[in-house]
Image (tube, rainbow, N blue to C red):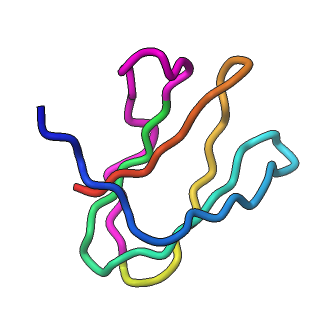
Amino acid sequence: AVLPERITGEITLGGVNEDGDLVFSWDTTDGQGYNVLTNADLTTTNWGVSDGPIVGDGSSITVTNTPVGPQLFYKVTVE
């Protein structure tokens, strides 16, 4: 299987907002598509698309996501 590429650079965790949502951001490339994937169990390959595709415009983008369950892992991939 061909794995999607990952973004280069840093993903900044902004913390948790007043509603309990996780806030994070990264710098985008103009016209590049991004997907935010989540998985509750890293022993499986069950990554699901939480947000996306998000199309970059060359600036920083901020994503807010409501975690479900006691733990949730995130990764950002490019299209």
Front position in the image: 64 or 7: 7
Q: Identify whether 62 is placed above or below 43.
A: below
Which quadrant of the figure contains the C terminus?
A: bottom left
- Residue 27, image x, y percentages: 48, 75
- Residue 52, image x, y percentages: 36, 48
Taking the image as shown, residue 24 lies to the left or right of residue 55, namely right
Q: Identify whether 44 is placed above or below 47.
A: above
Residue at 81% x, 39% y: name it: 20
- Residue 53, image x, y percentages: 31, 52
Q: To which quarter of the image does residue 44 belong?
A: top left
41 within the magenta span: yes
**Residues in magenta, as a range:** 39-56
Taking the image as shown, residue 22 lies to the left or right of residue 65, namely right
Q: Identify whether 78 is placed above or below 46.
A: below
- Residue 9, image x, y percentages: 47, 72
52 within the magenta span: yes
Query: Which residue ends up furthest to the left in the rendered image?
Result: 1
Residue at 63% x, 58% y: name it: 24
Front position in the image: 73 or 28: 73
Q: How many marks?
A: 0
Residue at 57% x, 56% y: name it: 63
Q: Identify whether 6 is placed above or below 36.
A: below
Taking the image as shown, residue 60 lies to the left or right of residue 37, namely right
Query: Which residue ends up furthest to the front in the rendered image?
Result: 43
Residue at 41% x, 74% y: name it: 28
Which quadrant of the figure contains the N terminus?
A: top left
Front position in the image: 8 or 66: 8
